[in-house]
Amino acid sequence: MSKKFLNTEILVEAGTKMLQMVSNKFEDIANLKYPVVPQVQPGFLRQQFSEKPPLEPESLDNILQETETKIFPGLTLWSHPNFYAYYPSNITHASIIAEIFASAFGTPGFQWLASPAQTELENIVVDWVVYGLDLPTKFLMKNQGGGTIAGTVSDAIFISVHAAKRRKMKQLNINTDSAQICKFVGYYIESAHACATKALHLKDIYYQRKLPVIFNDELQNYVVDLEKAIEIIEQDIKDGLIPFWLSCSFGTTGTCAFDPIDKLGEICQKYQIWFNVDAAYAGSSWLINEYREKAQGLEFADSIEINFAKLMMCGLTGSLFYVNDKSELAEAMGNKIDFEIYKNKFTDNYDVWDYKDWQVALGKRFNSIKMFWMIKSLGLNGMREQILQKIEVANHFEQLVKASNKFRLFTKPQLGLVTFILVNEDLAIQNKLNRKLQELINQNTMNGFISGSEIKGIFYLRISIANHTTTKQNVEEFWNHIQKLSEQL
């Protein structure tokens, strides 16, 4: 065969060099050789390459060199021990190796026939997670529900809004031209991720309700105000509106709060509202009994999102999406649309599920192989261990904050996230000081990179223990750095 376009000798030679380069970079990152955020300005990379593509081929050695010397220096290093911002985006060596296989054979995986092993491995992996996290058995593929690996959690939430809208239309026996659709109302919690309101916006839902949160003294965090939530829903019904979708969070982005899934589920069941549980960050913690017990009521969920690229380490994309009724979802996503080229005896006559009917896109990456490698290489015990390790480091940082007479905890630390504030009696001054402190911290991210947030008019700082390479020594040095910077204010 011609080796002009696929030369296996070059694949091995250049692939080995790429793996060596990546491995060296991981070692350098662990040894704090680079800042978390690169010291570059917009347009830095465009200035280093020609405006037009090359006409003639270049050697892979040259391309590798440019990748290392021009592209890598512009990366924000999410695997850095001093990356404390947002929530983590984790990877393990097993997932990196699996990525090679995932990309190698170009399988689009849109239906069983397009790649039988790809479809079935995804079935297997999503079922493993049901057992591992002790999810309700209705989410197993052999039962009414089931799961998939979505492109992102935002994609999954968008699809849940779409499916909820179609279900409500079916319940009301209306079509897309009905004026009643304009009365549909979607609900999300005040502390929810922005992707909830974005999904409602993309589905043209005019009535969007942000359910308020209150500070719960027992939980020491901000959770939904259930009385207000019921009041808002019932008022909408009195006004002739039609509630159809509600999303809560298990592990909010800002403070890692746990909304009361059981109580919200009962409300949604009473008013026939699709109930979505966004557990993108904290859902992985259900491997640990202590956290699974905090998530009572998952049996009410119509859909759940859990991101295994966060507390887990499968890398992007690891966004698990479970639905209560996979037939309902497939119909909502257009599985009845007639297109001759997709027809085959396996889809028509066998118990197989085509994942093209679970997403907007047709093609699907082979992400299940990465999750398969991660689970097999760590086992459930290893997966628990790396979560507990991050919690232990976060607990150490919590004690450092508690020992300070200038700072205090803002909410109860949870699952590797610690929120804190530089205290001032005047709230306006306090907010200004904390924003300025964040700005000083992020001017030089060799020592650390954070992202603050705001709730109920209070700006606070947050540190997320994102990586298994982060140690107690790392957070001690970062805390000392924070204290020194605070003296400049």
Image (cartoon, rainbow, N blue to C red):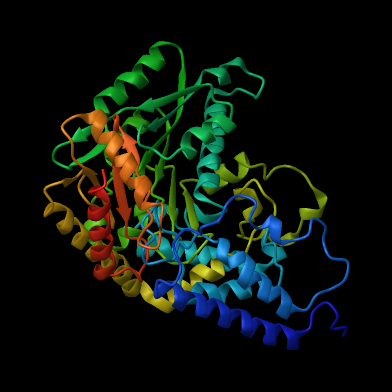
Rendered location of residue 315, percent (x, y): 50, 64
Residue located farthest toward the front when viewing the structure as drawn: 488
In the shown orientation, is residue 356 left or right of residue 1?
left
Task: Tell me which residue sits at (62%, 55%) in the image.
Answer: 355
Picture coordinates of residue 171 (x, y %)?
52, 27
Number of marks in the image? 0
Determine if residue 102 is in view.
Answer: no
**From the viewer's perspective, is 276 left or right of 287?**
right
Quarter of the picture containing the N terminus is: bottom right
Q: Residue furthest top?
A: 239
Residue 338 visible somewhere in the drawing: yes
Q: What residue do we see at 39% from left, 27% from top? A: 210
Q: Nearer the viewer, residue 432 or 358?
A: 432
In the rendered image, the vertical position of residue 461 relative to residue 32, given as above or below: above
Quarter of the image holding residue 283? bottom left
Q: Position of residue 362 (x, y in %)?
A: 70, 52
Q: Vertical placement of 146 versus 154: above or below?
A: below
Residue pictured at 31% horizontal, 53% vertical? 463
Answer above or below: position of 173 versus 260: above
Which residue corresponds to the image point at 77% horizontal and 44% vertical from the top-left?
338
Quadrant in which the C terminus appears: top left
In this image, 201 relative to 53: left or right?
left
Q: Quadrant of residue 48?
A: bottom right
Image position of 171 with respect to 480: above or below: above
| Most foreground residue, 346 or 65 | 65
Q: Nearer the viewer, residue 226 or 64?
A: 64
Coordinates of residue 125 in the picture (x, y in percent): 49, 66
